[in-house]
């Protein structure tokens, strides 16, 4: 089965909910996070492990180490053998679902034909295995690119304006008046849905506008004055935009003599998606009404927001630049950074003491500034190291790096406050500083399968 449609249309949520309510064993893996065939196979087996242990008498009797060895899965043939050996073979056995999200990414993997292999998983394993692909490409494009035809196709169209309005109204702030917020959404969606129907982007757009829209209403209520009508609120919102543009024009005519600092307009990379709203996260957990402090757990490397994989590597690299000294760069990758030359140094008997002292100093979150070329060097170093560790193809990494606008993503992270320019400007080679916490850096590293402590050397 192939479930397809535009992004953020509920494909993954509905498929997971349906297979979860079926009462049958199922596994979910996304090619966005499992970016190599081996990682995808391991994720499927890991998801099915509890059911396989319950179903297989040999696994129930085995120790934890023996179970781990029996379920080791490095190749597709290993996956087939595991399912054949441990799934029930009786005709009345329940079917097992395997859900593969972001399936269109499999078409770009070189080497073994993973997509075609998954389509034949039931045939090869001789077990009742139903594979469900979720992707964004159209039905015809997916079938022609894969060279095969899945049995069924289910299309999820983009949300209509009324559907978007219904969803956003459900996610409204807990203190927002429903009638007032509904009127606000009607005006905003008339403006934005002509060019954008991505739910994530609309969430990020309406949140700051709502704060400005409702401000006169809240002030009038606090003073006891007559409450303004929606038309007046919208006119006030537009007047604020107009006054801002007028001030900018006046400053330009005066030659920029105004003492107020000029605020740069955001220039956010289109691939850098926005955080999910607390309301959306709470709805995903089945909590309603939404508490004001509702947040995601983020445990075990799971993130409450969606950003591209290479952006996660950039943030981890920025964290390492802020907490490691230049001496670490010289030892680890020498000449990759301009002006650094790797030299052999004598062993110092006080090196361990200095390492412990530097680690204690870094524990108070003292962050160093760093140059752009240092960030790029760390970025390439940890991406290549992770590629080698996970057994991914170097050619695939090179292709991904070529297609990624790294400098634009760095600019986007600066605009979003994840990075800041400490001195100078980006054009003049200014010094950057990383603003993410150790906790977030560790969650990003876990999400990428990177051991952060391996790269934190301090001195």
Image (cartoon, helix red, strand yellow):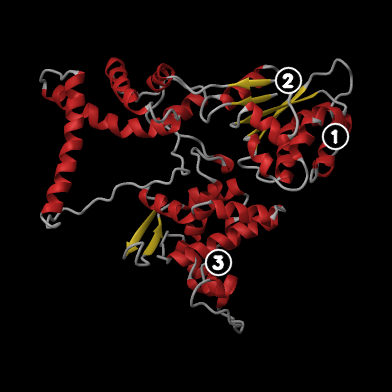
Q: Is mark 2 on a helix, strand or loop?
A: loop
Residue at the (85%, 15%) spot, across then down: 92
In the shown orientation, is residue 225 left or right of residue 310?
Answer: left
**On residue 216, which mark appears?**
none
Q: In this view, does 46 lie to the left or right of 279?
A: right
Q: Specify whether 184 is left or right of 128.
A: left
Q: Nearer the viewer, mark 1 or mark 2?
A: 2
Quickly name the residue at label 3.
Answer: 457
Mark 3 nearby-residue class (10 Å; few <14, some 14–19, many ≥20): some
Label 2: which residue?
24
**Residue at image point 81% right, 38% down:** 79
Q: Which mark is residue 59?
A: 1
Residue at 76 percent across and 48 percent down: it is: 111
Question: Tag 3's secondary structure?
Answer: loop
Q: Can residue 110 be seen in this view?
A: yes
What's the CA distance linking mark 1 and mark 2? Answer: 20 Å
The residue mark sitting in front, 3 or 2, is 2
Quadrant for residue 43, please give it.
Answer: top right
Q: Which residue is drawn at 74% across and 22% down?
A: 151
Task: From the top left corner, tell me how far across and down residue 41 is, in percent.
Answer: 75, 40
Q: Can residue 361 be seen in this view?
A: no
């Amino acid at each position: 089965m192939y479930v397809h449609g535009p992004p953020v249309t509920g494909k993954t949520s509905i498929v997971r909910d349906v297979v979860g309510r079926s009462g049958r064993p199922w596994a979910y893996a996304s090619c966005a996070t499992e970016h190599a065939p081996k990682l995808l196979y391991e994720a499927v087996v890991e998801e099915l492990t509890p059911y396989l242990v319950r179903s297989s008498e040999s696994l129930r009797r085995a120790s934890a180490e023996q179970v781990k060895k029996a379920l080791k899965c490095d190749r597709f043939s290993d996956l087939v053998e595991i399912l054949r050996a441990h799934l029930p073979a009786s005709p009345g056995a329940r079917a097992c679902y395997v859900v593969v999200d972001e399936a269109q990414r499999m078409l770009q993997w070189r080497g073994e034909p993973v997509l075609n292999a998954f389509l034949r998983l039931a045939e090869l394993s001789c077990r009742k295995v139903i594979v469900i692909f979720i992707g964004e490409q159209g039905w015809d494009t997916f079938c022609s690119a894969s060279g095969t035809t899945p049995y069924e196709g289910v299309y999820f169209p983009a949300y209509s304006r009324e559907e978007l309005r219904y969803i956003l109204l459900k996610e409204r702030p807990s203190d927002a008046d429903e009638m007032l917020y509904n009127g606000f959404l009607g005006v905003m969606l008339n403006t934005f849905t002509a060019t954008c129907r991505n739910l994530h982007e609309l969430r990020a757009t309406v949140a700051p506008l709502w704060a400005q829209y409702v401000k006169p209403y809240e002030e009038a209520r606090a003073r006891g004055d007559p409450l303004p009508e929606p038309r007046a609120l919208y006119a006030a919102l537009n007047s604020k935009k107009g006054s801002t543009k007028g001030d900018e024009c006046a400053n330009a005519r005066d030659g920029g003599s105004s003492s107020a600092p000029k605020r740069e307009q955001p220039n956010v990379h289109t691939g850098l998606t926005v955080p999910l709203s607390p309301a959306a996260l709470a709805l995903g957990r089945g909590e309603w009404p939404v508490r004001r402090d509702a947040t995601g757990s983020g445990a075990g490397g799971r993130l409450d927001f969606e950003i591209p994989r290479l952006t996660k590597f950039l943030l981890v690299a920025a964290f390492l630049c802020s907490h490691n000294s230049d001496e670490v760069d010289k030892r680890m990758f020498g000449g990759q950074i301009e002006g650094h030359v790797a030299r052999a140094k004598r062993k110092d008997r006080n090196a361990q003491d200095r390492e412990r002292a530097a680690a204690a100093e870094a524990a108070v979150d003292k962050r160093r500034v760093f140059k752009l070329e240092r960030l790029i060097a760390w970025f390439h170093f940890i991406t290549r190291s992770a590629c080698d560790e996970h057994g991914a193809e170097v050619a695939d990494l090179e292709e991904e790096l070529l297609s990624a606008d790294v400098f634009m993503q760095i600019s986007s992270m600066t605009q979003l406050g994840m990075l800041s320019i400490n001195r100078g400007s980006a054009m003049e080679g200014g010094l950057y500083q990383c603003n993410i916490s150790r906790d977030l850096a560790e969650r990003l590293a876990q999400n990428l399968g990177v051991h952060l402590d391996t790269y934190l050397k301090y001195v």
